[in-house]
Amino acid sequence: MSQVKLHVKKGDTVVVLAGKDKGKEGKIVEALPKKGKVVVEGVNKVKRHTKPSQKYPQGGIIQKEAPLNACKVMLVCPACKKAARTGKKEVNGKMVRACKKCGEVIDQTK
C-alpha cells in the first residue's frame, strides 16, 4: 500500500466525523501515514484478549484505542475552537497550516 499524505499530525486536536464515536474530540496519539490512519486518544476503544507478557503480567481483557481512518477526522482550530479545513499560508518565508474559517495560523511547535 502506498503512503498517504495526512491532513493532520501527531498532537493535533481532532473531532470524529463518522462512526460509533461521531462528535467526540481527542488528541492524535499516533499517525500512520503508510496505512492512512490515525490513533485518537479515548476514541475507537476496542477490547483485546491478551496472554500474560512482560508488559501485562496479569493478561486478560485490555481496552485500547484502535487506528481510525484519517478521512473520518477533522482538525479543530485552536483559535476559533471549531472543526475546520486547513490551507497553506506563507509566514516569514515558510509555508504553514492555516484555518480556512478564521484564517489563523495553526501552531507548528507542539
Image (cartoon, rainbow, N blue to C red):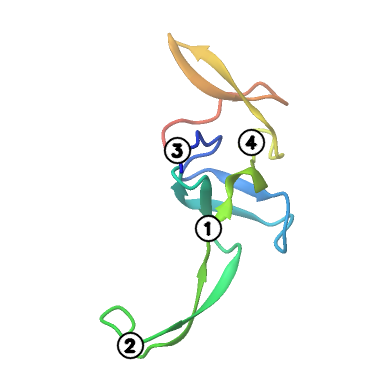
Marks 4 and 3, how far apart at CA: 26 Å
Numbered disc 2: secondary structure: loop
Pointer 4: what residue?
77
Q: Amino acid at mark 1?
A: Pro
Numbered disc 4: secondary structure: loop
Q: How far across and down, in percent of the image, does residue 25 sit?
A: 65, 54
Choose the circle earlier in sequence order: 1 or 2.
Answer: 2
Q: Amino acid at mark 2?
A: Pro
Q: Judge whether residue 73 can be spotted in this image.
A: no
Pointer 3: what residue?
3
Q: Amino acid at mark 3?
A: Gln
Q: Quadrant of residue 82?
A: top right
Marks 2 & 3, CB-CB < 8 Å contact: no
Q: In this rendering, which labeled residue sits more in front, label 4 or label 1? A: 1
Marks 4 and 1, how far apart at CA: 22 Å
Pointer 1: what residue?
67
**In this rendering, position of residue 59 left or right of residue 68:** left
Choose the circle earlier in sequence order: 4 or 3.
Answer: 3
Marks 3 and 1, how far apart at CA: 16 Å
At x 35% / y 91%, what residue is drawn?
58
Numbered disc 3: secondary structure: loop
Q: Amino acid at mark 4?
A: Cys
Pointer 2: what residue?
52
